[in-house]
Amino acid sequence: MSDPTDYTVGWICALKSEFVAAQEVLDEEHDPPDFVSTNDNNSYKVGRIAQHNVVIAVLPDGEYGTSSASAVARDMLHTFPNIRIGLMVGIGGGAPSSKRDIRLGDVVVSSPRNGNSGVFQYDFGKTIQERTFQHTKHLDQPPTFVRTAVASLQADHERKGHDILQVVETITNRNRRLRKYRRPDLATDVLYHSDFLHSAAAGDCAAASCASSPERTIKRRQRDQDEGDDDPTVHYGLVASANQLMKDATVRDRLAAEKDVLCFEMEAAGLMDHFPCLVIRGICDYSDTHKNDVWHGYAAMTAAAYTADLLRRIPQNRVEAEKKISYATHQLKQTVKGIQDYQKRDDLISCHGRYAKWSSFEDRMSLQEARQQQDIESYVEHELRPGGRFDRWQSRPSILKEMKDTIVSQSDHMFRWAACQLDSLAKCLSPVSLQKALHSLPQGLDKTYERMIQDISDENKDQAITILQLLVFSDRPLTVDELVDALAVDLTATETGKIAKRYGSQIYNHGNLLGLSVLVRARHLHVSD
């Protein structure tokens, strides 16, 4: 049996054909792991490629998309805590263009381009009236040493070519059960004009009217290895990911033109931020209505063959020096829960009979900035009232007016910012200190909280930061007793009770940042941010 702690490369597949291809490129297969985490729902194949011990997992049968991929990665990290390299390998839909001669069986490797990490989530963003959809999601990227190995392999292929086709032929000749993974007839690689849709009632493209419509196809020159053409060709650039299957050639062409997208797939967006991985896709179709399964096996094989070639270029000691991906397990759990909750809400809304009425926003209540500013002004006036904490300045109405005007004008519609500045000004005991504070108010909540932390005494700063960290990463508000107990955890301490007693009083010293009642929580969402 295999020891899960020996494995440093995590390879995730979405489909059975991808899982088969991944196992076929292993140099050596290992026995199954001798144990898995109690909550691990994955099934694994383990083995070795060059010096690297590799664990391969596949999504549950019939499940696709970002949520399922995140769940598989989460469970993998539970059982294999030493994984340092993440790989998402399989098939995808190509986005050929005048700049990119992408064909079936080619390989697309995620690579940073134009400010994107290499993976672009095209269904995440915001829709604003009378404007185009704005993409707002920025995803993480694999470690630097992996991207360096990609660049090195790319240069070698440009100089000497590659043997991806030969590797696939060797595998399929060795195992005749894998005949469907061989390269299909090139005549089945047909690219249709974007405005020509496949009829759902016509059956397979090869046997339907599509095949008898040569005027609707795009003519492409034959590749010639003597002229330096690689076949299959490996392309490097942007992979578009979303929780939906792309079968729209017009959208494909628009994203290829606007973002230089090379490929579409459905899993990577659920992985990148918390299981930073390289995405490698064999092209099995052209992301249009003319999809078919003929090229699935071969495309899965070309992607797997490229991945094995890449791993052979990475020294094992460099992998061991990289930070474990399992450090991000907590964030990954939150991502999975968020995606699943979002899908449940989306499904609930979609099936609701009155959903269409909501789109008109009848009798809606709007939040107007002018009214919000008036509310802040009323709040500040209330705080400056006679008998309050600013009572000492009642004989100086000009100072009270300056305080009100300054805070209201600089608040930028943020109640919390105004409240924080009043807390700070209340500590000023002289006109000189008050004027100085008014003329140096921090801009925005980030600067405000930064100043609050700087103002904490050196003696208490470590405890204050620890308190904030505990609250930010806790799944729920904490009671004061729970927070005291958490602060008391010290492996070097011999009398935990004394430590708890000493730290307990410190919690109340940081009221500006904390909401203190029976429960302790960050006073405002921006504190957590």
Image (spheres, helix red, strand yellow):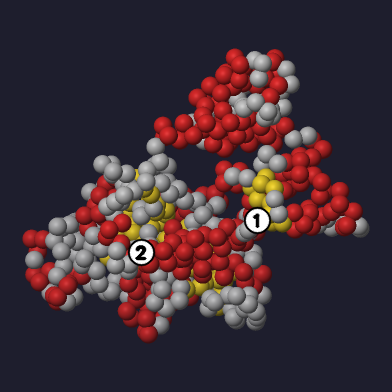
Q: Quadrant of residue 200?
A: bottom left
Q: Secondary structure at mark 1?
A: loop
Q: Residue at x 77, y 57 (%)?
A: 481
Above or below residue 1? Residue 128 is: above
Q: Quadrant of the C terminus?
A: top right
Q: Nearer the viewer, residue 510 or 182?
A: 510
* Mark 1 neighbour class, 10 Å CA radius: few under 14, some 14 to 19, many 20 or more: some
Residue type for callout 1: Pro
Q: Residue at x 62, y 34 (%)?
A: 420
Q: Going by the picture, which residue comes out furthest to the bottom? A: 177
Q: Residue at x 41, y 32 (%)?
A: 370
Question: For this view, does 107 lie left or right of residue 195?
Answer: right
Q: Quadrant of the N terminus?
A: bottom right
Q: Residue at x 38, y 49 (%)?
A: 125
Q: Which mark is residue 312?
A: none
Q: Nearer the viewer, residue 450 or 396?
A: 396
The residues bearing labels 2 and 1 have C-alpha atoms spaced at a distance of 30 Å
Q: Nearer the viewer, residue 347 or 469?
A: 347
Above or below residue 271? Residue 438 is: above
Report whether residue 161 is seen: no
Q: Nearer the viewer, residue 77 or 488?
A: 488
Q: How many numbered badges does the structure rendering display?
A: 2
**Residue 526 % position (x, y):** 57, 43
Q: Which residue is mark 1?
A: 477
Q: Secondary structure at mark 2?
A: helix
Q: Earlier in the sequence, mark 2 or mark 1?
A: 2
Q: Which mark is residue 349?
A: 2
* Mark 2 neighbour class, 10 Å CA radius: few under 14, some 14 to 19, many 20 or more: some
**Residue 333 % position (x, y):** 56, 63
Residue type for callout 2: Ile
**Residue 374 % position (x, y):** 46, 31
Report whether residue 367 is seen: yes
